[in-house]
Image (cartoon, rainbow, N blue to C red):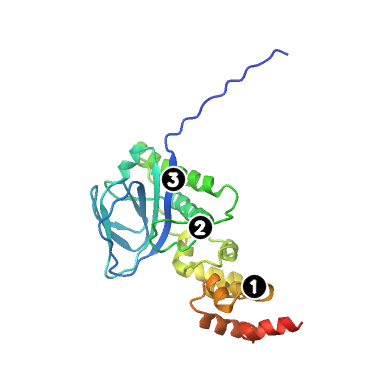
């Protein structure tokens, strides 16, 4: 058999994300606004619900639910929320070598269902990589000490995949897909997500975006699957973890309450007693005697 010489083809990278500044999920209050600002990186603005007024060099006007814009590097911009609504907004900052992203800075585009799904995966992976808070403007999002394997690379790939898909559709194709507001949700996946991220502040609106459904459907399906509301389920997971930390550490109840993201140690104590019939102090003393 003769020797065959294979040819290896080099692969070019048209869209290359080099750095990520932030991956935010904001629930802005009514009448919220920002002062004009600019920064040396691209910024995706996506409205998950409600509407948002944008004032930027490339576009001034309103963007609505399921619409997106991308601010160019060093483009002065600001945003204002409607007085009658509290929008939920995804903001992702990143550097990228592909200048054709400017096509998204002149007018909002309505994302397709597959594109929104890709955006949700970016938000999920951002939570894997970065420490909370996620809904507070930060100059630096700190990385977690032990993120899942290759989470930095996965986040980079997901952002590039989203940008390539959106660019193909908008810049190089006339095809359009209707946006579906919801999909058949898996309450089991939502429960698993809550168990993995129970130490973070998670809202119903954020879950609805991540799993591409609406609030009422999510709450109904989750209750049917678990027998509990999302808040009840999340509190049960937190109390189970609190019991473990009370038994295995010498941390104060205030420290445990803060680590598990309860609103206050008083609320934590009240919820703990309602769940176990004992205060955290009584529970620790009882376990010390065993």
Residue 180 in sight in this render = no
Q: Which of marks 2 and 3 is in front?
A: 3
Precedes in sequence: disc 2 or disc 1:
2
Image coordinates of residue 11 in percent, x first then y, are 50, 29
Nearer to the camera, 61 or 175: 61
Crowdedness of circle 3 by 10 Å Cα count: few (<14), some, many (20+)?
Answer: few
Q: Callout 3: helix, strand or loop? A: strand
Using residue 169 as the reference point, say whether residue 219 is left or right of it. Answer: right
- The Cα–Cα distance between marks 1 and 3, rounded to whole angstroms, is 36 Å
Question: Helix, strand or loop at disc 1?
Answer: helix
Q: Distance between the residues labelled 2 and 3?
A: 16 Å
In the image, is residue 191 above or below residue 103? below
Q: Label 1 near label 2: C-beta < 8 Å?
A: no
State if disc 3 and disc 2 touch (CB < 8 Å): no
Q: How crowded is mark 2: few (under 14 residues within 10 Å), some or many (20 or more)?
A: many
Badge 2 element: helix
Q: Residue 127 bears which disc, if any?
A: 2
- The quadrant of the rendering that contains the C terminus is bottom right
User: Is 83 placed left or right of 151 in the picture?
Assistant: left
Q: In this view, does 238 lie above or below 148?
A: below
Quadrant of the image occupied by residue 257: bottom right
Closest to the observer: 217 or 144? 144
- For the question of whether residue 185 can be seen, the reply is yes
Residue at 58% x, 20% y is 7
Q: What numbered label is drawn on residue 245?
A: 1
| Percent position of residue 13, x then y | 45, 33
* Picture quarter with the N terminus: top right
The residue carrying mark 3 is 19
Give the Cα separation between the discs numbered 2 and 1. Answer: 23 Å
Q: Where is residue 210 in the image (x, y as percent from the top left)?
A: 48, 59
Residue at the farthest top position: 2
Residue 117: x and y in percent read: 47, 52
């Amino acid at each position: 058999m003769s020797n065959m010489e294979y040819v290896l083809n080099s692969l070019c990278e048209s869209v290359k994300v080099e750095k990520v500044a932030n991956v935010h999920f904001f629930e802005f209050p009514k009448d919220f606004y920002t002062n004009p600002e600019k920064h040396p990186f691209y910024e995706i603005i996506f409205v998950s619900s409600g509407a948002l007024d944008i004032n930027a060099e490339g576009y001034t006007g309103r963007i609505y639910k399921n619409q997106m814009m991308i601010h160019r590097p060093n483009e002065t911009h600001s945003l204002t929320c409607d007085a009658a609504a509290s929008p939920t907004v995804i903001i992702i900052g990143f550097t990228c070598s592909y200048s054709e992203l400017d096509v998204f800075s002149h007018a909002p585009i309505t994302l397709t269902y597959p594109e929104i799904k890709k955006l949700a995966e970016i938000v999920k992976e951002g939570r894997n990589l970065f420490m909370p808070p996620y809904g507070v403007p930060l100059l630096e999002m700190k990385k977690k000490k032990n993120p899942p394997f290759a989470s930095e690379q996965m986040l980079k790939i997901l952002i590039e995949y989203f940008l390539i898909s959106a660019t193909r559709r908008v810049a190089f194709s006339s095809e359009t897909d209707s946006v579906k507001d919801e999909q058949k949700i898996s309450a089991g996946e939502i429960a698993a997500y809550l168990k993995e991220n129970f130490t973070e502040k998670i809202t119903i609106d954020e879950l609805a975006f991540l799993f591409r459904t609406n609030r009422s459907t999510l709450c109904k399906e989750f209750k049917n699957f678990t027998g509990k509301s999302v808040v009840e389920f999340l509190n049960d997971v937190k109390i189970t973890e609190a019991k473990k930390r009370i038994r295995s550490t010498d941390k104060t109840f205030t420290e445990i309450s803060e680590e598990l993201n309860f609103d206050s140690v008083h609320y934590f104590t009240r919820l703990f007693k309602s769940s176990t019939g004992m205060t955290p102090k009584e529970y620790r003393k009882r376990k010390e005697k065993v």
